[in-house]
Amino acid sequence: MPVCSLATQRFDATSTKLLGEAVPVAEGLTRTSRRETTFSVSDTGLLAFHARSGEDLARLVVLDRDEARFREVRAGLPGLVGIVVADVADRPSVDAAFAEVDRLLGAVDVVIANAGISIRHRFLDITPEEWRRVMAVNLDGVFNTAQAGARRMAAAGGGAILLTASTNGVVGLPFYADYNASKAGVILLARSMALELAPAIRVNAICPGYVMTPMQQAEYTPEMLRATDAKIPLGRHARPEEVAALFAYLASDEGAYITGAAIPIDGGELAGGLASRDWIRALPAPDASDDPPGPGPTTPATEAAT
């Protein structure tokens, strides 16, 4: 799943990351009017957020390194002001992108940093190049995006920053050592930022568990899906719009007293330590020469950086 960054001038629900289908606007979001927003989000998530905020989301700018997808993104975002080529793993690219956002929108007061990749490997088989690539996108990219936005918010007097972490950053999961480490880093980055940037700027990390995105669904056999759902207390994967609603709430004025939190949205997965139970060991190990299908982290194997 390619991942991109998004900037909006918001009137309403501001930002949300994620991965999914168009959904109705959530009640209570219209009170967060007149805010400018920047995010790292997946392309399908842009559609979910745009639909969620409805007519109140007035202006939108997308940052994405995949120019081939620009037409597709435009078609799903009628409020789009522009698309800026950017790679969150590259700081000069992020700085240039935010300069263009400044020109297009004038201000930023919500940032969602979501870009992420994963590579399903045994720990002993991870190469230094693979480790560095995952960290460059998942941790450096979050830092680059969040800092560029935070500097603008500090100058303007306030804002909200949301970082996409994962339940993988809270408990271990085999075959994703690099991804897990990067998401644990995102959680501690959010908490450290929250302490330094309060009271003007709120910072939180969102930790999704299994989310039924099109890419996640494509990785499962029917048997794998049933086995995974059976281990989640609520008995199913999250729907993309459910995760989108959490991001929208935290970005809105209704979430004004929440900062420094790492909030799971996982159907109860972490309540019993399900991610580290013995059933995980029954999953097929990755082939040394391939990346086979199988239940993976929140952001499964992806290749694009922003």
Image: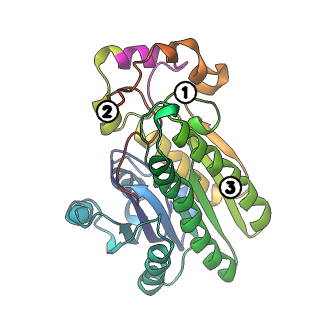
With respect to residue 180, does 66 lie above or below?
Answer: below
Q: Identify the residue position indicated by label 2 in the image.
A: 289
Residue 144, quarter of picture: bottom right
Q: Horizontally, is 259 left or right of 233 in the view?
A: right
Q: Which residue is pictured at 51% across the width and 69% down the height?
A: 37
Q: Amino acid at mark 1?
A: Gly
Residue 33: give x, y in percent of width and height. 54, 69
Q: Horizontally, is 169 left or right of 291 in the view?
A: right
Q: Amino acid at mark 2?
A: Ser
Q: Earlier in the sequence, mark 3 or mark 1?
A: 3
Q: Which residues are magenta?
A: 224-237
Q: Earlier in the sequence, mark 2 or mark 1?
A: 1
Q: Identify the residue position indicated by label 1 in the image.
A: 267
Tag 1, which secondary structure?
A: loop
The question of residue 8 being in magenta is answered with: no
**Residue 198 visible at all:** no
Q: Amino acid at mark 3?
A: Leu
Residue 124: give x, y in percent of width and height. 51, 32
- Measured in 3D between alpha carbons, the distance from the residue under mark 3 to the one under mark 1, in whole angstroms, is 24 Å
Q: In the rendered structure, are the residues bearing label 2 and label 3 in contact, judged by CB atoms less than 8 Å apart?
A: no
The question of residue 230 being in magenta is answered with: yes
Q: Nearer the viewer, residue 282 or 264?
A: 282
Residue 68: give x, y in percent of width and height. 21, 63
Tag 3, which secondary structure?
A: helix
With respect to residue 297, does 46 lie above or below?
Answer: below
Q: Identify the residue position indicated by label 3 in the image.
A: 189
